[in-house]
């Protein structure tokens, strides 16, 4: 397969390929686990606020809409009772959209949560009988949420008192969890849907990368480390025109997507976690900057000078050369800048379609480089999706947004090894975990139902 992408030098890059070097969770030897799972010292001790993954894709069964999905609370063991895994109250869970290329949010979807806890001093149980509906009196603990849409023109409440799908206690307590999931999906005014609740951990990868990059000889691969774990998820499906600059998808097809968590510190809300592209903070930021990166808005990325070299001269590529003899491409790595920081625009070479650079938006101003997950909403869903996305010629896949089936670890490995420079994939460079253990659902919110079997029993 041939693939070449025109690279453009960027001056004053700042964070530069924060995502590119991020492309591997390979270099961390401290507490980092998976895509932004416990990646920074402070957030490692605060799982309720820890963003794990963000997905953005044109809905496969409704191509005039986009699905946005963000997850929190890494490594939820299904049997983690009696309190299980509620969202934090007095906090804000956000999905932010930039549609004009300045790296600032033009639209923010904000979820806030409150508890209804009937246990008091009478019981420790989450429920005292089978739960067959979200309002079942047997369910002693539930959460409700408010969803707001925030724009420069004001704030609109889209959902008030929505009910969160509860943690999946087990088959005796919740004999038909699919019904609970279905009841938790709310319709939005003007079209669209939203969901909040527990879901399967759909990010698949082998985390033995930390043992000298898969054992130093690629022998430690093929084991899905996140298999059987759950996460907390919020999801949104909205018309593409709601997200596009001036509502015009044809003229302005590209959006940038990030998710953040704001925690109330007693006097104000403070951003404590951030996730845009997968596998960023683990690999690019040195330990001393990781907490700061979680608090940084994308529009500030270009000001973080210490991270520049870690992008244009990624350590991962040099490690792949040292350990596996895969020759690192020449630096500076402007190919990674375009793939992971500015987005890919049609130039010369075999890619025959515009992808995800926000300079493609006709009505936008000057592009500000920033680490964001960029999606071209005008590219229709692939009839036969390829797990390697753009690198395999599937222009609807990562790094053009991110689908639940995209193998972001293998894509990142190949990108850092130079696939966009040489035009060829590196044989054998894979963690051999190619798909999630549970199939992706065919309708919103697409992410599989949460597991109710202990991880060590799977």
Image: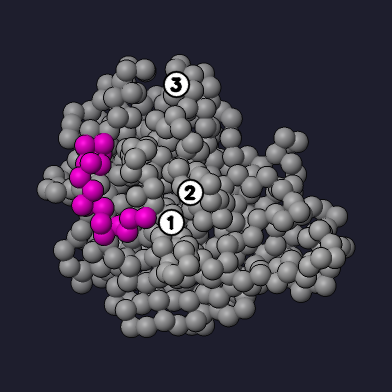
For residue 212, the mark is 3
Q: Earlier in the sequence, mark 2 or mark 3?
A: 2
Decide which of tag 3 and tag 1 comes sooner along the chain.
Answer: 3
**Does label 2 or label 1 sit earlier along the sequence?**
2
Question: Which SS class for mark 3?
Answer: helix
CA gap between label 2 and label 3 equals 25 Å
Contact check, label 2 and label 1, Cβ < 8 Å? yes
The residues colored magenta run 295-311
233, above or below 107, in the image:
above
**Numbered circle sitting on residue 346:** none
Residue at 40% of width from left, 76% of height from top?
150
Decide whether residue 303 is among the magenta residues.
yes
Of 54 and 32, the residue lying toward us: 32
Which quadrant would residue 156 be assigned to in this image?
bottom left
Question: Regarding mark 2 in the picture, which secondary structure is present there?
Answer: helix
Residue 292 colored in magenta in the image? no
Cα–Cα span, label 3 and label 1: 30 Å
Magenta part, dominant SS: helix
The residue that label 1 is drawn on is 272
Q: Does residue 354 appear left or right of residue 443 in this picture?
A: left
Pointer 2 residue: 43
Q: Nearer the viewer, residue 309 or 175?
A: 309
Locate the N terminus and report the quarter of the image it occupies.
top left
Give coordinates of residue 282: x percent, y percent. Answer: 41, 40
Mark 3 crowdedness (10 Å alpha carbons): few <14, some 14-19, many ≥20: some
User: Where's residue 424, x and y in %?
Assistant: 31, 30
């Amino acid at each position: 397969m041939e693939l070449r992408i025109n690279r453009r030098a960027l001056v004053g890059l700042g964070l530069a390929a924060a995502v590119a070097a991020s492309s591997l969770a390979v270099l961390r030897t401290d507490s980092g686990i998976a895509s932004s799972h416990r990646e920074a010292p402070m957030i490692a001790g605060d799982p309720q606020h820890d963003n794990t993954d963000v997905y953005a894709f044109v809905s496969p069964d409704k191509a005039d809409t986009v699905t946005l999905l963000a997850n929190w609370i890494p490594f939820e063991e299904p049997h983690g009772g009696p309190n299980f895994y509620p969202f934090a109250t007095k906090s804000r869970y956000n999905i932010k959209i930039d549609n004009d290329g300045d790296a600032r949010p033009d639209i923010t979807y904000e979820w806030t949560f409150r508890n209804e806890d009937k246990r008091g001093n009478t019981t420790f149980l989450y429920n005292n009988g089978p739960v067959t509906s979200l309002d079942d009196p047997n369910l002693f603990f539930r959460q409700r949420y408010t969803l707001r849409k925030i724009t420069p023109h004001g704030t609109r409440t889209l959902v008030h008192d929505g009910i969160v799908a509860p943690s999946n206690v087990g088959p005796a307590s919740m004999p038909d969890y699919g019904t609970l999931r279905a009841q938790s999906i709310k319709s939005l005014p003007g079209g669209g849907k939203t969901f909040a609740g527990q879901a399967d951990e759909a990010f698949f990868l082998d985390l033995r990368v930390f043992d000298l990059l898969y054992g130093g000889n690629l022998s430690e691969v093929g084991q899905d480390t996140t298999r059987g774990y759950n996460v907390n998820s919020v999801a949104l499906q909205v018309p593409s025109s709601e997200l596009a600059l001036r509502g015009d998808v044809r003229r302005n097809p590209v959006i940038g997507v990030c998710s953040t968590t704001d925690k109330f510190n007693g006097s104000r809300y403070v951003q404590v976690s951030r996730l845009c592209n997968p596998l960023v903070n683990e690999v690019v930021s040195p330990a001393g900057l990781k907490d700061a990166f979680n608090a940084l808005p994308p529009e500030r990325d270009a000001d973080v000078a210490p991270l520049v070299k870690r992008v244009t001269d990624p350590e991962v590529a040099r490690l792949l050369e040292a350990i596996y003899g895969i020759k690192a491409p020449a630096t500076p790595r402007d190919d990674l800048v375009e793939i992971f920081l500015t987005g890919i625009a049609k130039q010369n070479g075999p890619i025959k379609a515009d992808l995800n650079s926000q300079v493609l938006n006709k009505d936008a101003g000057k592009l500000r480089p920033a680490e964001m997950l960029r999606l071209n909403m005008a590219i229709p869903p692939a009839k036969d999706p390829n797990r390697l996305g753009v690198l395999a010629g599937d222009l609807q896949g990562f790094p053009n947004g991110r689908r639940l089936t995209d193998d972001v670890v293998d894509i990142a490995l190949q990108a850092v090894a130079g696939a966009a420079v040489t035009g060829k994939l590196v044989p054998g460079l894979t963690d051999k975990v190619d798909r999630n253990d549970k199939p992706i659902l065919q309708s919103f919110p697409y992410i599989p139902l949460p597991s109710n079997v202990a991880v060590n029993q799977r």
